[in-house]
Each structure stands twice: as structure tokens, then as C-alpha cells.
Amino acid sequence: MKYWTVALLLSSPSLALANAEVWIDVGSQEEYATEHLHDAVHIPYTYIARGVSARYPDKQTAIKLYDRDGFRAQQASEALQTLGYQQVMDKGGLAALKESGLTTQQTDLHADATPTVAVHSLNDTAGLYADLPAIDSY
């Protein structure tokens, strides 16, 4: 019986990863393209409620928020706590996170130096129920 339970948990990504820790950059697209934490998801703070609810419906998900200066991360943290997310952490600004030893990366830019744009659930032209993007950027 215990092997069946383990197999069920491993076969269901939403159950197995329900309490996974995620980093979310709540800054602008340009800031995210310039530099962001390695493996961070980009959801601008103006879309934080819809973006997090769509991508992480489990309110027990450990969510760590940051942006360039930390101010928008604080606003996003308050919004998610109001929605009932239990493990939301405002981690402040990117510079302090880099000083603590976390690594960063840059997003590829088009030749005209504008960030790439993906069709996703928050894109007004795609509609509210479009599939989530293959890349981690809103």
C-alpha cells in the first residue's frame, strides 16, 4: 500500500510539487531582461494575483518575492497574503540577494534590444484562458 501512495504522489506533479519553493521577480519586463535570479519566474507585481493564482493554485506554496529595490516585492507580498497564501516571503532587492551569494542571469533580447514576448494567460491578445508559456516570463 505504501508503494502505491508514493507512486501516486510521484505521478502527479501538482501533488508532488505542491510545497515547492519558487522565486518570483515582480519587477518590470525590462528589469527582468536586464538581470534576474537564476530560475526565477517573472510575474510583474501589477499581475501578481492573477499570475500566482493561475500558476500556483496551492496556497501552501513557498513563494519568495523580490524586485530591483524591494518596494514592489513588499506590495506583492501583501496582496498574496490577502489572497490567503500562507508562505509568502518578501526577500527585498536584487542587489542584496546577489550579495548573499545567489546567482543571476540575463534574458535574451531581440536585435532591437526589446525583450522577447510570449503568448500567455495574462496577454490581452491571447485571452484569459490561453496556455501558460514555455518560458518563465510574463
Image (spheres, rainbow, N blue to C red):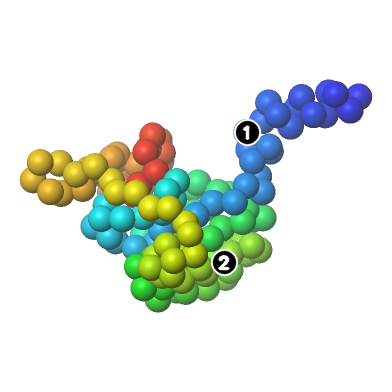
Q: Which mark is residue 13?
A: 1
Q: Is residue 109 above or below residue 74?
A: above
Q: CA distance from mark 1 to mark 2?
A: 23 Å
Residue 94 location, quadrant: bottom left
115 sits left or right of 17 in the view: left
The residue positioned farthest toward the left in the image shown: 112
Which of 93 and 102 lies nearest the eye of the viewer?
102
Q: Which mark is residue 89?
A: 2
Q: Which mark is residue 135?
A: none
Residue drawn at point x = 38 percent, y = 34 percent: 134
Residue 79 can be seen, yes or no: no
| Amino acid type indicated by mark 1 | Pro
Q: Position of residue 120 (x, y in %)?
A: 34, 41
Which of 13 and 106 lies nearest the eye of the viewer?
106
81 sits left or right of 137 in the view: right
Q: Position of residue 73 (x, y in %)?
A: 44, 69
| Amino acid type indicated by mark 2 | Met
Residue 88 can be seen, yes or no: yes
Q: Earlier in the sequence, mark 1 or mark 2?
A: 1
134 sits left or right of 16 in the view: left
Residue 2 location, quadrant: top right
SS at badge 1: helix
SS at badge 2: strand
Quadrant location, the N terminus:
top right
Q: Is residue 76 above or below residue 43?
A: below
